[in-house]
Amino acid sequence: MGGIRKKIAIVGGGITGLSAAYYAKKLFAEHHIPVDLTLIEKSEQLGGKIRTRHRDGFVIEQGPDSFMSRKLPIIALTRELGLEDELTATNPKAKTNYILHKGRLHRMPLGLVLGIPTEVAPFIKTGLISPIGKARAAFDLLLPKKKGVKDESLGSFIERRLGKEVLEHITEPLLAGIYAGDTGALSLKATFPQFHELEQKHRSLILGMLSGKKRTRETKGLPEIARNSMFLTYKGGLETLVNRLTEVLQPTKVITSQGVVEIARDEQEYHLRLEQGLEMKADGLIMALPAYQTAELMPDLPALKWLKKIPYVSVANIVLAFNQEDIAFPLDGSGFVVPRGEGRTITACTWTSSKWLHTVPKGKILLRTYVGRAGAQEWVPLTDGQLLAKVRSDLKEIMGITAEPIFHEITRLKQSMPQYPVGHLEQLKKLREELICERPGIFLCGAGYQGVGIPDCIQQGKQAAEQMFKYMKSL
């Protein structure tokens, strides 16, 4: 690379783009290679869906509210940024979760791992599954493994191993909640590849999960707080991570409030045109946008047309604050999920003030409800008033809440949840191979590709930075 300064543009300033910028800056600096990094974000604020609001002593997450504690990419980044002391765990007294079944909340059986039963007694006692359904689930211990490596839907896999009742009443509302998806359409290998691996290695999914539980306890590299809580966040909210990344990126050039509208290429470099007419050049691009937006920016590239076929689902969360004396319902857990067959507007409700003790002032209650999933988008055209009325109706019928909230906040996240179709990873591999030939120096990352969680997006951003570094060294 010599002493010539290379120019890299990172398009998209969500957590993936921020992570890509952070790791790219770090890599090039460690190797004393001159580079000009530019991070471009269409909205006014960096962080994408991560938004934390502080109001009257409440800590309100308007996007994701936590991350899985055992995912090392975010733990490593947290340590590098000096934020480990800011981590906070869920309330140890609020470990119970509930599932709505026939209009009543049922305690989730102990021993469930990602919705898969691993303890016999609690599963036998649960009212969520009929005796026939329980017997069918036990067949997992006897059924042979499926031969071959072909992808299948998450739903067909669970039904094949554990039966339809377990799928519909337990695993679908739990697992689909992560993707707001239809398990019958989501790719198994792109969402829960460990399920496929467990079947291949242990034949039985339940036996494989039991083995996995033992290994999980021995996970290395985790801080003590991550060993005792499945989920973590930061004391000041998830925006703590965004703010620190923004700080350490200085003096990297950051452009906000205007997105990229056109990308062209000549023999040497890429030419970008932004919304307000600004033009810039780059030797390499990291595209950290939703998949369909990336496809729209390069319509002449046949390989990218497939990205438009990845559906995105709209979701919303509605936060409601109450005085403690107005809520008679015993908030003795972290919340509940709602199976599709219950016919409710809400898909889940987190008892935020019970699950996260740092989020409310004394004497207050905070509930966070979720709306929207694949095949259930009829709420989208509703006004905020109509949506709030439906949510409050559900809470009244499920939890008996009739009190007026102190306040409420509605956050709509349009086309925010990618739905990985069956065969997703195979198509993604082909796409990346074609990009190497057709558009060298362009690297894709983000929730639309290999994981929607914050740790997954951080890992993808880091990988894109490493790929970019390797590419620039080859020039």
Image (cartoon, helix red, strand yellow):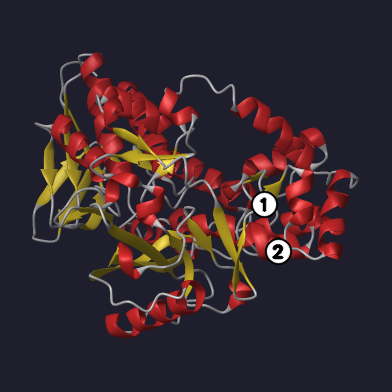
Nearest the viewer among 326 and 2 is: 326
Nearest the viewer among 256 and 270 is: 256
The quadrant holding residue 196 is: top right
Q: Which residue corresponds to the image point at 31% horizontal and 62% vertical from the top-left?
A: 324
Q: Which residue corresponds to the image point at 54% horizontal and 75% vertical from the top-left?
A: 375
Classed neighbour count for the residue bearing mark 1: other residues with Cα under 10 Å, few (<14), some (14–19), many (≥20): many
Q: Position of residue 325 (x, y in %)?
A: 32, 66
Task: Give the secondary structure at mark 2.
Answer: loop
Nearest the viewer among 363 and 344 is: 363
User: Does 321 sit above or below residue 71?
Assistant: below
User: Does 148 sit above or below residue 201?
Assistant: below
Q: Is residue 142 left or right of residue 182?
A: right
**Quadrant in which the C terminus appears:** top left
What kind of residue is marked 1?
A: Pro
Alpha carbons under labels 1 and 2: distance apart: 9 Å
Classed neighbour count for the residue bearing mark 2: other residues with Cα under 10 Å, few (<14), some (14–19), many (≥20): many
Q: Position of residue 118 (x, y in %)?
A: 73, 42
Q: Are marks 1 and 2 in contact (CB under 8 Å)?
A: yes
Q: Which mark is residue 128?
A: 2
Q: Which mark is residue 109?
A: 1
Q: Position of residue 253 (x, y in %)?
A: 11, 38
Q: Position of residue 408 (x, y in %)?
A: 26, 70
* Residue 381 visible in the displayed image: no
What kind of residue is marked 2?
A: Leu
Q: Which residue corresponds to the image point at 23% horizontal and 42% vertical from the top-left?
A: 236
Task: Name which of mark 1 and mark 2 comes first in the sequence.
Answer: 1
Q: Which mark is residue 341?
A: none
